Image (cartoon, grey):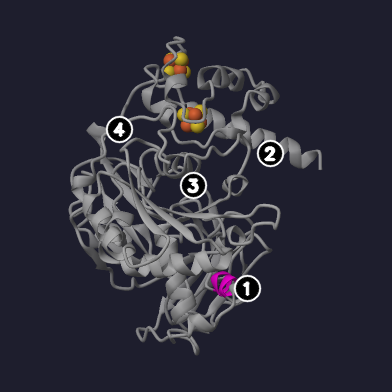
Amino acid sequence: MMGRFFGGVHPDYNKDLSRGKPIETMPVPGRLVVYLSQNLGAPSKAVVKKGDAVLKGQVIAESGGFVSTPVHAPVSGVVAAIDTFPHPVGTDLPAIVIEPDGNDRWADGCDVERDVDALSSAEIRDLVHDGGLVGMGGATFPTHVKLSPPPEKPIDVLVLNGAECEPYLSADHRMMVEHAEEILDGAALFARVIEVGRVIVGIEKNKPDAIAAMRERAAGREGFEVAALDVVYPQGAEKQLIFAVTGRRVPAGGLPMDVGVLVQNVATCRAAREAVRFNRPLIERVLTVTGRAIAEPKNLLVRVGTPFEDIVAFCGGMSGETGKIISGGPMMGVSQYSLAAAVTKGTSGIVLLRRDEVAQFVSDACIRCGRCVEACPMRLDPSTLSILVERMRFDDAGETGVNDCMECGCCAYVCPSRRPLVQHFRRAKAELRAKARKAG
Ligand code: SF4
Ligand code: SF4
């Protein structure tokens, strides 16, 4: 059953800048900055030290807990430093810096095909963990955790997220056009782990070539189908996607497993195939470099740890006056103050906007127009919530549902007063988290 979720917006998608560009492989840069924080949850713990020689695919940081993943050397070379560096989330975080040796040599055992038919569900799940897999749509939640639902939450549908509803981005789109079979091969591995017979790929209708490619490949697989979805932001948000393709509503504060669904991004599926079938851990990803302030927009396959400044240079540098650099898409991405950060497993794109494209408005008082209420896919009242935050009434904001906010930005997009609504809600959630931690 197909559903249309409440709210949402129709921003200018600007995908024409890059969607027709085939994925290009970027050469290995002269220095890679590999953060220990590559996943939602506990950061990984370094197991190498300055001066160590490393091989491609070697574990350089082990999981920091169950909700964590190992990190692997994206290239063979030498550990030049372990220090803090600007991270795309906007703060300085620890990272292992590797200087390549030019050989790009795999560690023993990597890049070797396995007989996946002989693997049990538990073995596949362990290999997903060992491969360092996280949600590559940007959420970076460790994939092996998602594949471990409690017995009282049986899953009967696997949903592949190919919506890519964020404006400008086209990495998943190109991945589906160029690597449909590999995505479905990885999805079949996930389906085996959670023992589901039904797999639905959700793709927005503005990617007809991706829909065609995935349908062609899905046709030969029993239980697989492709759903063409309305083009509306945030169609790719987990709860909205689940409703769109299954008609099931995830309750407020609930998880997809509460309605028997597991969602995986299409790029994560392909990464699973690489890790499980070929023992190639997650050391590279496809991202979109785009916007009118970059000379040559591209979809690029880059190593994790590639500095943004190398990527921008590979794309011909900036063109014109850059007003804003965003890691991720313009709706949910994080503004960068420089190009000092490097690619993580969750970096879906780098968007460079010209100065004249960036809204320069000063925010104003709420005029109670109600547009944010109509746009909020979570049926929240962003206007009231933002006023509570301004008055530092964080507990009241919590009771009014601020923790259900997924920071999609729809409310801010439609607000005529240009109120910093998402920043308000992030602040309220951080205050509530800090209070909960303090309370033990
Ligand atoms: S950012 Fe939060 S409050 Fe605003 S529309 Fe999205 S879910 Fe609703
Ligand atoms: S859209 Fe902006 S001005 Fe209108 S009610 Fe919401 S917060 Fe207030």
**Which label belongs to residue 122?**
1
**Which label belongs to residue 90?**
3
Residue 324 within the segment the image draws in magenta: no
Q: Looking at the image, is mark 4 or mark 2 nearer the viewer?
A: 4
Q: Secondary structure at mark 1?
A: helix
Q: Looking at the image, is mark 4 or mark 3 nearer the viewer?
A: 4
In three-dimensional space, the C-alpha distance between marks 4 and 2, rounded to whole angstroms, equals 31 Å
Residue 224: x percent and y percent?
40, 60
In three-dimensional space, the C-alpha distance between marks 3 and 1, rounded to whole angstroms, equals 36 Å
In three-dimensional space, the C-alpha distance between marks 4 and 1, rounded to whole angstroms, equals 42 Å
Tell which circle, 4 or 3, labels the residue nearer the N-terminal end: 4
Horizontal side of 208 relative to 85 (left or right) equals left
Residue at screen point 42% across, 27% down: 7
**Which label belongs to residue 11?**
4
Residue 244: x percent and y percent?
42, 40
Horizontal side of 20 relative to 158 (left or right) equals left
Q: Which of 361 and 19 lies nearest the eye of the viewer?
A: 19
Horizontal side of 348 relative to 210 (left or right) equals right
Residue 155: x percent and y percent?
58, 55
Tell me if I can see residue 284 in this picture: no
Picture quadrant where residue 307 is located: bottom left
Q: Which residue is mark 2?
A: 433
Q: Secondary structure at mark 2?
A: helix
Question: In terms of secondary structure, what is the magenta stretch mainly?
Answer: helix
Amino acid at the residue labelled 1: Ala
Amino acid at the residue labelled 3: Gly
Position above or below: 291 against 180: above
Considering the image in quadrants, where does the N terminus appear?
top left
Magenta stretch bounds: 124-130
